[in-house]
Image: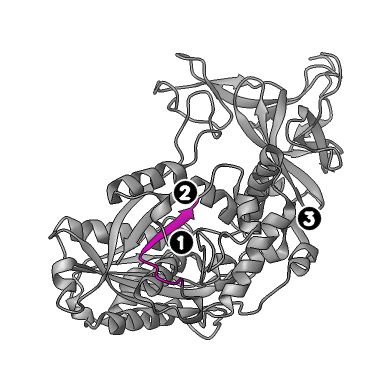
Amino acid sequence: MSDEVVVLGVGLHPFGRFPEKTVEDLGREAGLAALDDAGIEFKDVETAFLGRVGGSGPPVGVGMRIFSELGQHGPPITNVELACGSSSRALMLAADSIRAGSADVAMVIGVEKMERGMLQVGGVGATNYASVMGLNVMPAAYGMMAQRHMADYGTKPEHFAQVSVKSHRNAVNNPYAQYRIAITLEEVLGARMVCDPITLYQCCPTSDGASAVILASEKFGRTRTTSPVRMRSWAGGSPMYTSGREGLGEGPTEIVARKVYERAGLGPEDIDVTQVHDAFTPGEILTIEELGYVKHGEGGPFVWEGGTEINGKFPVNTDGGLLSRGHPMGATGGAMVTEIVRQLRGEAGARQVAGAKVGLVQNAGIGGVNVMVFDK
Amino acid sequence: MGATATDGIVPLKEGLFVLPDTPDGRPQLLGVECPSCHTRFAAKRFVCLECGHRGMDECRLSSFGTIHTFTIIHQTPKGSVMEAPYAIAQVHLDDGPIVSTAIADVAGVRVGLPVEMALHDVKVDDEGRRVVAYVFKPRREGP
């Protein structure tokens, strides 16, 4: 098909703390790595998108600054912001451009420099009522999801903790990860409680980092590689009002995933490797249910029994996820795609899922959700 | 004006909730109600999510609800008047809306707990008045 979209190149700047580097430095390094991986030059890029939330660095125009560091042949540059889902939304817009025939090569960079400390919606020290009353604490949203899941299904605190044990073990083998140390279940459960049942080691860190992904039409892609990874289907969504049940209806991940499966002509049973938005440990357990990998309520025991391990039935967050790879907000979606592409190419080394042919990415930000499926 | 139950009490922020009308009354959150379909929302909005009607009426929401879910926060956020550990919850009000709120009872908080709205002393201002916020606490017997 002429309108197929392929992933030609991926690249990362390691995630962690890099006080000596600017957002431009981080973005440029990831961008150059992706151009080399794709085997193209920046002048081949016909449209460019930047995913970034805010944080340190200039408040506006960062896309222009970063892409200008790679070259200045005049492509359109678009800044995309969807909180923690910024670069995956940017990638879907880039893919739309290619499928629409308005570009043959599109490039996405995601970048962020963040401050240390607990994320507070609206910023630390905000003076609105909810912030003053201590209601705008980011981990609390996940803590509340976990408590409801525990009450409805009997999910246990150690089920959530096990997500972190698994993600840390995976990150040991990821040279780009922020935390490359294995931790035990006892250490996770015994760490300082943040928002019941979430302990400190069940929270993603704040991070600096960058990701870059280059998409191309299949026709262009074939000039560089004989067997590119395809971006097969994608869809985004946001919370939907349900009559009489404001805030209590079906979440967007479930709805968006069904759309993506239908467009790709496959189902959850076909997915070999997955990246989900585990900013806090409940993210993995709830999302594998919403993606249809297991029934609602079965996510906790499934993780506990190893179902999401690299050698499990549905390997999840093989690179350590947000929890251990790190979560520089604007860079995260592109990093998730980078891991899936490396898995499908068979380049994931000690993290490799044997024979992975189909991969799925779920990235969320401030209520918005992006789901995409890749295959080879 | 005669003396009321709220003499010497001021809300932390105007326009979010009203103080009790009587000494044993409950405070009430201010929400909006659609004049066309009568659906209520906790957050101020102009367009009705249920029927699309433009223009909403301010209303007093029910002081009673049930805990949909909760968590206990163990780290005091910078700039907050709440001291950890404190409980917060999503409360499903009896008249429909869901609200985020602090819960006054850390030990007894649980999913499904019936709760009612109450005042929470934040500080005393320069004029000696009680500055109050709202919380929800386990529902007491009676009206």
The reply to whether the magenta stretch includes residue A365 is yes
Distance from Cα at disc 3 to Cα at disc 1 = 32 Å
Which label was assigned to residue A291?
A: 2
Mark 2 in CB contact with mark 1 (< 8 angstroms): yes
Residue at disc 1, secondary structure? strand
Q: Secondary structure at mark 3?
A: loop
Q: Nearer the viewer, residue B13 or A67?
A: A67
In the image, taking residue A334 as reference, residue A146 lies left or right, namely right
Mark 2 element type: loop
Task: Please state the horizontal and vertical placement of residue A106, each as a whole percent of the image.
Answer: 24, 68
Marks 3 & 2, CB-CB < 8 Å contact = no
Nearest to the observer: residue A270 or residue B121: A270
Coordinates of residue A87 in the picture (x, y in percent): 39, 63
Q: Quadrant of residue B87?
A: top right
Q: Hey, which quadrant is residue B4 in on the image?
A: top right
Callout 2, which amino acid? Leu
Q: Which mark is residue B74?
A: 3
Q: Image point 64% across, 51% down: which residue?
A: A300
Which residue is at 65% across, 54% downward? A139
Magenta region: which residues? A353-367
Q: Is residue A175 above or below residue B53?
A: below
- Label 3: few (<14), some (14–19) or many (≥20) C-alpha neighbours in 10 Å: some
Parent chain of label 3: B
- Mark closer to the observer (3, 2): 2
